[in-house]
């Protein structure tokens, strides 16, 4: 069944609707000040460790890396895999994530002498292609690194964003990562600060209100804009 919001027919209307969603989220939650991480390298590590993991568990892993003096490209690259996996165990899939971290750090050392500044000096599309070529870096991880570590424009699409946009009735015809991303990038200004805050607000809303099961539509700041909320209200 077609599940698109009727306002989404015109590009200008869709842009205005996405802006309205942002304004309501911002009014409800305020600035989120993302990404959690003290340095760009910590953001990179966090972006890899947070794959299929709660951020609280990622924080534990990063805390252990920091305590052991292992939160640097060289330390991660040279550490025995088994030891690194144990340090990041709390993030889940720890053996795979240890390999991913070491693959990134090996590439950073081989190509850029451990300089993130040199890696991030590329334009966003070139940087994205390079990141996607690395072991264990998918689209969401690459875009998180580009936006939050490199400070370049890339709208991050995650499960929270898909859920909220789908329930609102705004999801694209083809539900690929790129189609969801284009929904935002084609209708919003190219603005790093906006992309940063918008994604963070969507995550907050997905955690607090638009839950995977039993969403709290009665207290949702987007209820008037959301097809799902309107349908639930009509069913009562």
Image (tube, rainbow, N blue to C red):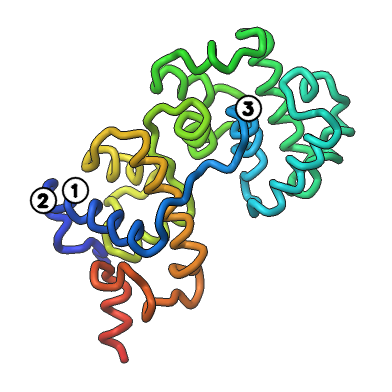
Q: Quadrant of residue 46?
A: top right
* Mark sitting on residue 208: none
**SS type, badge 3:** helix
Q: Work out whether 16 lies above or below 155.
A: below
Q: Work out whether 185 lies above or below 169.
A: above
Q: Which mark is first along the chain, 1 or 3?
A: 1
- In this view of the protein, which residue sits in the foreground, 103 or 70? 70
**SS type, badge 1:** helix
Q: Quadrant of the N terminus?
A: bottom left
Residues under labels 2 and 3: Cα distance? 41 Å
**For the point 70% across and 16% down, which residue is it?**
106
Q: Contact (CB < 8 A) between labels 2 and 3? A: no
Looking at the rendered image, the disc whose residue lies closer to the viewer, 3 or 1, is: 3
Q: Work out whether 53 lies above or below 221.
A: above
Residues under labels 3 and 1: Cα distance? 34 Å
Q: Quadrant of the C terminus?
A: bottom left
Locate residue 89, reporting x and y percent.
Answer: 81, 45
- In this view of the protein, which residue sits in the foreground, 72 or 181? 72
Locate residue 234, reporting x and y percent.
Answer: 26, 86
Q: Residues within 10 Å of mark 1 (few under 14, many from 20)?
A: many
Q: According to the image, label 1 marks what residue?
A: 15
**For the point 61% across and 30% down, which residue is it?**
39
Q: According to the image, label 3 marks what residue?
A: 41
**SS type, badge 2:** loop
- In this view of the protein, which residue sits in the foreground, 17 or 135? 17
Q: According to the image, label 2 marks what residue?
A: 10
**For the point 31% across and 48% down, which residue is it?**
174
Locate residue 96, reporting x and y percent.
Answer: 74, 37
Q: Quadrant of residue 154?
A: top left
Q: Which mark is first along the chain, 3 or 2?
A: 2
């Amino acid at each position: 069944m077609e599940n698109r919001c009727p306002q989404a027919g015109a590009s200008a209307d869709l842009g205005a609707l996405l802006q309205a969603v942002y304004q309501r989220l911002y009014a409800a939650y305020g600035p989120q000040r993302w990404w959690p991480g003290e340095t760009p390298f910590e953001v990179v590590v966090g972006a890899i460790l947070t794959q299929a993991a709660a951020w609280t568990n990622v924080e534990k892993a990063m805390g252990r890396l920091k305590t052991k003096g292992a939160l640097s490209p060289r330390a991660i690259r040279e550490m025995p895999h088994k030891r690194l996996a144990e340090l990041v165990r709390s993030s889940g899939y720890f053996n795979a994530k240890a390999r991913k971290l070491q693959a990134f750090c090996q590439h950073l050392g081989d190509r850029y002498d451990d300089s993130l500044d040199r890696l991030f000096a590329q334009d966003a599309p070139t940087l994205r292609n390079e990141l996607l070529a690395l072991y264990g870096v998918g689209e969401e991880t690459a875009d998180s690194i580009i936006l939050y570590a490199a400070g370049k424009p890339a709208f991050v699409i995650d499960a929270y964003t898909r859920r909220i946009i789908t329930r609102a009735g705004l999801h694209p015809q083809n539900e690929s990562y790129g189609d969801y991303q284009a929904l935002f990038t084609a209708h919003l200004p190219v603005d790093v600060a906006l992309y940063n805050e918008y994604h963070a607000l969507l995550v907050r809303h997905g955690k607090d209100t638009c839950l995977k099961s039993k969403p709290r539509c009665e207290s949702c700041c987007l209820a008037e804009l959301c097809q799902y909320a309107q349908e639930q209200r009509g069913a009562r």
